């Protein structure tokens, strides 16, 4: 494994350990962790999305490849969602855990694990295209993902308004708008302030705290879980196997017919991102929307460990 990828994995566990130790030393409690989760989902994550789009350049070739990746991304999510429903149908689960398992199967840890792997294996250009492949994640995690978590809870179904207008989707819409406006205001004072100055830098710095804070939150949840809950959960092992083996294998079958027709770099991105561990964000949203945060933390921990 590339040393950069190994380092990213180790950093994940170090950050988890910080949250774990903070709880054991009584520096953080559940209320504090809940506040951090709310800060992540409502402030730092949307800021990261906006900053990501603001730093991209609009080119004809880039838009063409971005369109191809968006197409592959749509196919990926159709496959992953189908697999998630098949999983909960074949593997008996309690109603509250069902949504967590589906979230863990559908959404990969693209932002923190996926992008460093893309950089290490394919180079810096892959990060740009990876951001486009990840656009549906940013939209679906805050809509369908929340629906997964809340559909089994009486009286807590997600309205269409909540699905379309929440901090995550709003951040993405603002980011896309600023991305499209960038060429129109280039060379103006507005461009210097927003795209080259304090606005972009502030958003980048706020957004850069997202993953670190998320991993700390996972550590706080694991600190309250028993060892048996982590390593005796057979379903969590099955979810990890599905996430790390089944989903990327199916995605490989999808892209193979396009060899020789599409840039190899573009074809590699869907497979690599599809093979990432379970999304860290599952824990944050589980805490925010009354899901089983411990189960989500176990899934993230095990899939990251086995990746």
Image (tube, rainbow, N blue to C red):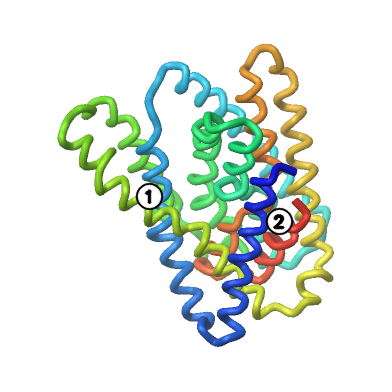
Let me know if residue 62 appears in the view: yes
Q: Residue at x 55, y 87 (%)?
A: 26
Q: Residue at x 75, y 61 (%)?
A: 302
Residue furthest to the bottom in view is: 26
The image quadrant that residue 217 belongs to is bottom right
On screen, 263 above or below 4? Answer: above
**Image quadrant in which the N terminus is located:** top right
> Would residue 107 be seen by someone viewing this image from the given angle?
no
- What residue lies at 74% left-to-right and 67% top-to-bottom? 94
Along the horizontal axis of the image, is 201 left or right of 222?
A: left
* Image quadrant assignment for residue 254: top right
- Vertical placement of residue 180 versus 239, above or below: above
Residue 67 x %, y %:
51, 24
Image location (x, y in percent) of residue 203:
34, 51
Please determine whether, in this image, residue 290 is positioned above or below residue 184. below
Whether residue 32 sits left or right of residue 8 in the image: it is left
Q: Is residue 170 left or right of residue 108?
A: left
The spot of residue 153 in percent (x, y) is 59, 68
- Quarter of the rendering containing residue 18: bottom right
Q: Mark 2: few, some, or many residues within 10 Å (few <14, many ≥20)?
A: many
Point out the tag, 2 or 1, that comes first from the N-terminus.
Answer: 1
The label number, if any, that marks residue 136 in the structure image? none
Could you tell me how far apart the alpha carbons at marks 2 and 1 are, in whole angstroms? 26 Å
Q: Which residue is located at x 43 percent, y 52 percent?
A: 168
Residue extending farthest top? 260
Residue 55 located left or right of residue 12: left
Question: Regarding mark 1 in the picture, which secondary structure is present there?
Answer: helix
User: What percent of the width, then of the height, locates residue 20?
Assistant: 62, 76
Question: How many residues crowd mark 1 within 10 Å: few (<14), some (14–19), many (20+)?
Answer: many
Q: Which mark is residue 304?
A: 2
The residue identified by callout 1 is 204
């Amino acid at each position: 494994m590339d040393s950069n990828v190994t380092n990213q994995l180790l950093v994940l566990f170090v950050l988890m350990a910080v949250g774990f130790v903070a709880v054991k030393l009584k520096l953080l409690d559940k209320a504090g962790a809940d506040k951090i989760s709310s800060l992540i989902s409502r402030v730092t994550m949307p800021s990261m999305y906006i900053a990501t789009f603001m730093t991209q350049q609009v080119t004809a070739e880039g838009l063409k490849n971005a369109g191809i990746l968006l197409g592959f991304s749509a196919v990926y999510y159709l496959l992953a969602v189908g697999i998630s429903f098949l999983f909960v149908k074949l593997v008996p689960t309690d109603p509250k855990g069902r949504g967590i398992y589906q979230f863990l199967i559908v959404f990969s840890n693209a932002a923190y694990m996926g992008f460093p792997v893309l950089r290490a294996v394919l180079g810096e250009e892959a990060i740009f295209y990876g951001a486009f492949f990840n656009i549906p994640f940013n939209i679906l995690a805050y809509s369908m993902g929340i629906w997964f978590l809340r559909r089994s809870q009486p009286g807590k179904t997600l309205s269409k308004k909540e699905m379309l207008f929440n901090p995550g989707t709003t951040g993405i819409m603002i980011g896309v708008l600023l991305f499209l406006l960038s060429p129109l205001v280039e060379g103006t004072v507005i461009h210097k302030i927003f795209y080259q100055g304090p606005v972009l830098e502030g958003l980048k710095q706020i957004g850069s705290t997202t993953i670190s804070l998320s991993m700390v939150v996972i550590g706080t949840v694991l600190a309250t879980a028993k060892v048996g809950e982590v390593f005796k959960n057979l379903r969590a092992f099955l979810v990890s196997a599905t996430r790390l083996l089944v989903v990327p294998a199916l995605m490989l079958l999808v892209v193979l017919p396009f060899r020789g027709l599409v840039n190899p770099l573009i074809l590699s991105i869907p497979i690599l991102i599809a093979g990432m561990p379970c999304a860290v964000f599952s824990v944050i949203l589980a805490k925010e929307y009354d899901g089983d945060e411990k189960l989500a933390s176990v899934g993230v921990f095990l899939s990251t460990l086995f990746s």
